[in-house]
Image (cartoon, rainbow, N blue to C red):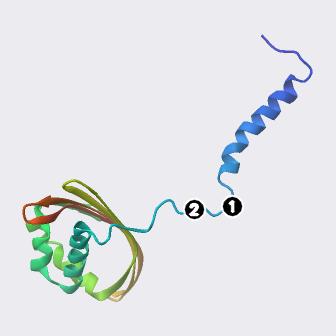
Amino acid sequence: MLIKHPKFGLISALLLTATSSFTVNAHGDEEHAKKSALFVNVSSAAAKVVSSFHTALKQGDKVTARQLLADDVIIFEGGGVERSADEYANHHMLADMKYLSAINSDLLEHQVFINGDMAYSVSRSKSHGNYKGKEISATGMESITLKNTDSGWKITHIHWSN
């Protein structure tokens, strides 16, 4: 049934314009308030394990880096996967250590969330320097999960991307 009221078209157009403009107006040029702090729980025991792992890699300390990983850690990086701490220690860890010792990284944000014996860490960093003759300038993202064991917090999963 068609409505043949003379103002129906005008009213319909106004309603359509009003409702469709909400999405445009919802994201104007205003600066959005930060939804969360950039550094959260970074002094927690779980966060200290993450920081110690980074320090061990940067300093080439294979023993400490290996000790902070759970035996069955799963590491995703660059489309690849390593399925144990030993596999990582004997395969990709040394390359990561060489790379990290050659560049500088600035931590942009780091949040650690703890729920009982589980924790997860998310961070972003800006890396810059020169590695193997190539200028490096990259923003990296890292997600780490940890489990609190009888011997302290252990890293159970890492996902690196940049």
Horizontal relation, residue 102 to residue 136: left or right: left
Observer able to see residue 86? yes
For mark 2, give the secondary structure. Answer: loop
Horizontal relation, residue 93 to residue 12: left or right: left
Q: Position of residue 62 (x, y in %)?
A: 12, 79
Horizontal relation, residue 110 to residue 27: left or right: left
Q: How many marks?
A: 2
Of the residues tagged 2 and 1, which is closer to the observer?
2
> What residue is shown with label 2?
33
Q: Position of residue 11 (x, y in %)?
A: 84, 28
> What residue is shown with label 1?
29
Quadrant for the N terminus in the image: top right
Residue drawn 43% across the image and 68% down it:
38
Identify whether 10 is placed above or below 101. above
Q: Nearer the viewer, residue 30 or 157?
A: 30
Counting other residues with Cα less than 10 Å from the Cα at mark 2, is it few (<14), some (14-19), or many (20 or more)? few
Q: Position of residue 110 (x, y in %)?
A: 37, 69
Q: In the picture, residue 129 is in which quadrant? A: bottom left
Three-letter amino acid code at the position of disc 1: Asp
Q: Nearer the viewer, residue 105 or 80?
A: 105
Residue drawn 27% across the image and 82% down it:
99
Residue drawn 90% across the image and 24% down it:
7
Quadrant for the C terminus in the image: bottom left
Q: In the picture, residue 56 is in which quadrant? A: bottom left
Counting other residues with Cα less than 10 Å from the Cα at mark 1, is it few (<14), some (14-19), or many (20 or more)? few
Residue drawn 12% across the image and 78% down it:
64
